[in-house]
Image: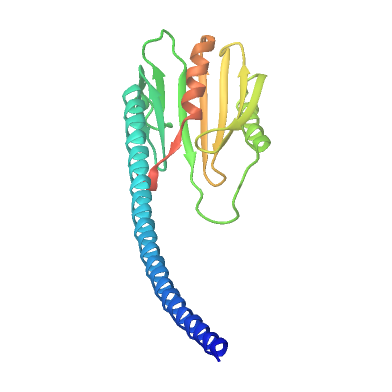
Amino acid sequence: MYTSCGFQSNLQIQSSLARAVTVDSEAATKTRTLHTLNVSGHFKKDNGRATMRKKGYLLFIAIGIIITMIIAISIFSIKHKYYSMDNFKIPFSKGWIDISNENPNGPPSFIKDLKDNPGVLQISHAEYLSGKLPNPSYDDLVELSKNIGQKNDFGEIVNKSSGDCNYGKYGFVEFKNKDFPFISVWHISDSKNFIFVTYICSVKPDPDEISEVYGILKNIKKKWLGFL
């Protein structure tokens, strides 16, 4: 009997312990759940703050890029002056002047005022209106330039080249004859519109002058929104 009672007592003790463990387990589970909710909420707050910081950094970077672009454009504008045409503008370096009023029926004309016997740079354009897009290749632009030179008896072909530029692509041909030792004919296109250029010199220009003119032509750019 004692043994049995003792056994029953042991069962009662174990049952009491089990209930105590169950209560402790439930309390611990509730504690862990509450901790998890607290941690989860903390992570959400941290994620929200991180997102806001990321947006702030991106905004700061965007503002920095815009400021840098404005400064770069300002510096470039100080060194260059633009001649504006319908949908593009030409960045002339110091010393170039517009002499178009001397030839009112001709295309816009420019010379380097600081030089004796300067070459004459003339620029005109044709604007696309409708129909199939021209989309000329590099070879097409060179061929157009060659045809203009041969049609106007510009003389012997001494050089030709093509490539990419700010406006799109270009192709040019250089000629020479007994009266004009250097004539350069250019066609520039953005796949739709065309810019036509001649640079005609009565005295052979030095390489630096040619490089300057070609730099001007390669940096012709479209206007932003059609007017900037």
Height in image: 111 above or below 172?
A: above
- Number of marks in the image? 0
Q: Answer yes or no: is residue 228 visible.
A: no
Could you say which is closer to the camera, residue 73 or residue 199?
73
Residue at left 41%, top 26%?
109
Residue at left 61%, top 46%?
135
Which image quarter is the N terminus in? bottom right
Could you say which is closer to the camera, residue 44 or residue 197?
44
Height in image: 199 above or below 61?
A: above
Residue at left 47%, top 16%?
119
Residue 141: x %, y % from top left: 62, 35
Residue 143: x %, y % from top left: 67, 33
Residue 180: x %, y % from top left: 56, 14
Q: Answer yes or no: is residue 169 visible.
A: yes
Tell me which corner region of the image, top left, top right, bottom left or bottom right, holds residue 116.
top left
Residue at left 34%, top 49%?
53
Color theme of the render: rainbow
Tell me which corner region of the image, top left, top right, bottom left or bottom right, holds residue 161.
top right
Which image quarter is the C terminus in? top left
Q: Residue furthest bottom?
A: 1
